[in-house]
Image (cartoon, helix red, strand yellow):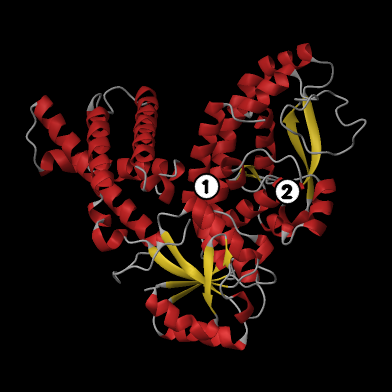
Amino acid sequence: MIFSPAPKSRRPQLRLSERRLLLMGGDMLAAVLAVLIALLIWSWVGRYRFDLDFILPRSVWFIVLPGLWLLLASANDFYDVRVSTSRMATTQRLLVITLQMLVIYLLVFFLAQPLALPRLFILYYGVASFLLTGLFRFFNPALAGWASERRRVLIVGTDEATTTIIGAIGRYAHRAYDIRGIIGEADDFGSDICEVPILGTGRDLLRLAQAEAVSELIVTSTHALSAETFQGVMDAYEAGITIVPMPLLYESITGQVPVEYVMNNWSVVLPIEGDSIFNPYPVFKRLLDILLALVGLAAFGALLPLLGLLIRLDSPGGIFYSQERVGLNGRVFRIYKFRSMRADAEAATGAVFSSRGDRRVTRVGRWMRKTRLDELPQIINVLRGDMSIVGPRPERPEHVQRLVEKIPFYRTRHVIRPGLTGWAQVRYNYGANDEDALVKLQYDLYYIRHQSLALDLNIMVRTVGKVIKMSGV
């Protein structure tokens, strides 16, 4: 049960974003200290004088290694509240991140020129960063005392969105938020929603907020607030209590935009600033797309003879498969894939979603789909500008036409280029129906609202993990 007795103290309560910043700051400090310790050990072993003349030529490691750590930590959900508040989960993720970092370093080491990188330096760093970060996370010096206090909240509203946000907090952030109760209408008083009691009406809001030492109000109502409730919310705001719309909190703790509850509030779905000629992100993103596509083109050329032979031997039909998809601004283009299904897969059904265990998939096709190799020819679409490396996966026109009518804001997926991989692909299982399409849209809208090179790299790292695990369908 989420509701608990009223607290005795009124210590400051950190927001979820503030806790994450503290964790990131502590991890970065641990990473920098680990680099310093690794350099110190290196100097002892090599019998060098440990001074500025030794450190300065190697100062690039103070940027590269903490940066790599932050990227891998983010890609492994190391700052997710469910992980950061569990010692077992923290230890597991910390070990995985350290091993990933060592593997990346070894790949760079073997590709670099001889003597360009020290042999044991990264091992010293790996051990030191593991120990320092583990000590910081287990003892939580930055989150001790007042900073560890759960953020006490009241929910304003009794509609379906209230049930949704209570469920999301219970699943994703129950160690960060303490729901004290719900503000409803007079007829609701004395009942509860998901075992959280309805404590009163808008007239009681400020009094209840002060009595429960509440620091935040979550407003879930998707319709206009009553005059009494609106007045109570404004009184609380003037008293220094934070007001948060339910869609924004839901997005923060789940990585999804709850399109069912934003109604006509476009600012919750899309950034309202629009494009800017001073924003370097689109240029850098396109350059990264071209660079990675050229690397992928080399892999495509190397694998084509083998994969082509296996596809032809496994089942009759062509090596490649082409399909119409909807891209940027609703423009239809043709996508290219290695054929993974029978040549007559849709002869009887027409355009349908693929599903787990789909009998139309060939033996070689099943293996290619698990490793995502069937998507490799789409690097041609990336080079042509139809697609990006990262973005919402493009859907077929037949499905788009149906989903636009069924799902609010579905067309907003087309405001950016579709991608080979995306936030929905690394955070959600394979979609096989319209309900899955709604969940994937929620993730896609989160990506659209928070686009950045850091998020793109995060998604790429997660995608590599998915490929290694062979988690494709």
Residue name at image x 62 percent, y 73 percent: 221
Where disc 1 sits, the SS reads helix
Q: Position of residue 422 (x, y in %)?
A: 60, 45
What residue is shown at x 12% (from left), y 25% (from top)? 45
**The disc label shown at residue 159, or none:** none
Give residue 77's position: percent from left, percent from top.
44, 44
Residue 364, by quadrant, is top right
Please identify the quarter of the rendering in which residue 33 is found.
top left
* Neighbourhood count class around disc 2 (C-alpha, 10 Å): few under 14, some 14–19, many 20 upward: few
Q: Which mark is residue 435?
A: 2
Side of 198 where 382 appears, left or right: right
Q: Nearer the viewer, residue 421 or 15?
A: 15
Hey, what amino acid is under mark 1? Asp
Residue 373 visible within the image: no
**Residue type highlighted by circle 2:** Glu
Would residue 53 appear left or right of 187 to someone viewing this image? left
User: Earlier along the polypeptide chain: callout 1 or callout 2?
Assistant: 2
Screen quadrant of the C terminus? top right
Q: Mark 2 and mark 1 in contact (Cβ < 8 Å)?
A: no
Question: What x and y, as percent, mark residue 462?
Answer: 51, 38
Foreground of the two, 404 or 149: 149
Which residue corresponds to mark 1? Answer: 456
Q: State the residue lying farthest toward the top.
A: 313
The residue at the point 81 percent across, 47 percent down is 399
Q: Position of residue 230 (x, y in %)?
A: 56, 84
Q: Is residue 189 above or below residue 422?
A: below
Q: Secondary structure at mark 2?
A: helix
Q: Does 343 sit above or below residue 405?
A: above
Based on the displayed image, in which of its 4 quarters is residue 190 positioned?
bottom right
Check the image and report above or below for 27 versus 121: below
Taking the view exactly as shown, the residue that stands out farthest to the right is 348
